[in-house]
Amino acid sequence: MVHDTNASASDMAPDPDSLGDDDISYSDWQSPAGALIEVSIDRKIWPDAIVNSFQKTALKIFDAILAAHDSALASVSLCLCDDQQIQQINRQHRQFNKPTNVLSFPTYDMRSDKIDPAVPALLGDIIIAAETVVREADAMQIPVADHLMHLFVHGMLHLFGYDHIEDDMAEAMETLEIQFLAEVGIANPYQNAQLEGDR
């Protein structure tokens, strides 16, 4: 997991020519509060059942996170890809030539940039890799859907400037993750295991 203030949203967009037109789907998911998740999904690797379930819950939790940060009109770009694509992005932006579970690339530095809450803002990009999500969920013996939602929440909090580099920051971030996940009925993900790349 990482957030990178040096990458732009266009740097993170998947290349539509890299896969067949039938392999990647693009859609906009609008939340009840009017926020937007711009989604690209590698349909070869992400099952419809997981994506459909995730969409409903992600929109609820998206609104909750935005409301907690006074950003009701915000949007985020979400890429549900495979390990190969996230490995390429990880190598390009972090110089780590390996897949990871989630990468976050904020558009703003929420601690210093002034953002008008009345104007819709693209908060940044979140990329999540299917095979790693499944592998980690299996290892932790939790549902894939729960782990996917945890990674989405984790990525969203990175976009708002949270991090887990230092213990006190990690504790604050984990507390919020647990809180937001509990609101949609997902158990504390830190009870038994740590995420790849965490502390």
Image (tube, grey):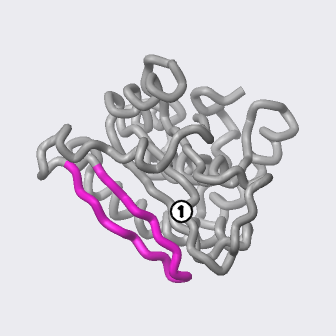
Part of the protein shown in magenta: 24-41
Q: Residue at image x 72%, y 59%? A: 179
Residue 191 x %, y %: 70, 39
Classify the position of the N terminus by image quarter: top right
190 to the left or right of 120: right
Q: Residue at image x 25%, y 42%? A: 45
Q: Residue at image x 51%, y 82%? A: 32
What residue type is disc 1 on? Leu
Q: Identify the residue under disc 1.
A: 122
User: What is the chief secondary structure element of the magenta stretch?
Assistant: strand
Residue 78 x %, y %: 43, 54
Q: Residue at image x 20%, y 38%? A: 18
Q: Confirm whether the magenta stretch covers residue 27.
A: yes
121 to the left or right of 101: right
Q: Confirm whether the magenta stretch covers residue 25.
A: yes
| Frontmost residue, 55 versus 124 | 124
| Frontmost residue, 21 versus 122 | 122
| Frontmost residue, 96 versus 41 | 96
Displayed quadrant of residue 121: bottom right
Classify the position of the C terminus by image quarter: top right
Displayed quadrant of residue 135: top left
Residue 65 x %, y %: 65, 65
Residue 58's place in the image compared with 22, above or below, is below
Residue 157's place in the image compared with 180, above or below, is above
Residue 49 x %, y %: 29, 58
